Amino acid sequence: MNITVTVNGETYERDVDPRRLLIHFIRDDLDLTGSHVGCDTGNCGACTILYNGDAVKSCMLLAVQADGAKIETVESLSANGELDGLQQAFSDHHALQCGYCTPGMLMSAKHLLDHNASPTEGEIRKGIQGNICRCTGYVNIVEAIKAASK
């Protein structure tokens, strides 16, 4: 099937297999490898992207479902090789260790901050609840998101 999708501000037209997952389209067809494939079951959140402004797990969508969609991946956060404020806050607050969950965590945090510029700790925890981090214990992630909201 032919699809047209806008990813990080650039429009792509591609012929895709109707069974192809969106995460594989993003990573393999568009060579945007920042989003990670974690569980392939929608549980871990490593593949979280913004899809028409909503945080979604791209392993749970088919690429054909993205026809006409506007998608933002973790690559959209930095500009000219410079970290944006959210990425810098993650670095400053040691909110990552192995880094596997980080792209999805950043996109969930971006979604939260796009809709709530000054979230409480409880709202931050709720906003990232679909993302599993096996390394950090979440404390530094929450601190980073609080810092980025200021």
Image: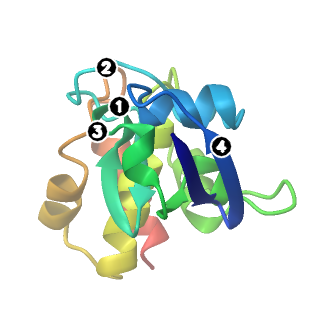
Instruction: Tell me which numbered mark, 1 or 2, is placed earlier along the sequence.
Output: 2
Note whether 53 is above or below 91 in the view shown. below
Which residue is labeled 2 in the image?
40
- Find residue 51 and report its horizontal and vertical position in percent: 40, 59
Whether residue 95 is visible: no
Residue wearing tag 4? 14
In the rendered structure, which disc, 3 or 1, sits on the residue that comes first in sequence? 1
- Check contact, mark 4 vs mark 1: CB within 8 A: no
Q: How many badges with numbers are in the image? A: 4
Mark 4 vs mark 3: give the one in front: 4
Q: Is residue 112 above or below residue 87?
A: below
**Image location of residue 44, percent across then percent down:** 27, 28
Say which residue label 3 marks. 138
How many other residues sit within 10 Å of disc 3, few (<14), some (14-19) or many (≥20)? some
Q: Residue at x 41, y 31 (%)?
A: 18
Q: Secondary structure at mark 2?
A: loop
> Can residue 127 be seen at all in this image of the molecule?
yes
The amino acid pointed to by label 2 is Asp
CA–CA distance in space, label 4 to label 1: 18 Å
Q: Position of residue 73 (x, y in %)?
A: 56, 50
> How is the rendered protein coloured?
rainbow
Residue at 52%, 49% (x, y): give it. 90
State the residue in front, 86 or 6: 6
Amino acid found under the numbered disc labelled 1: Cys
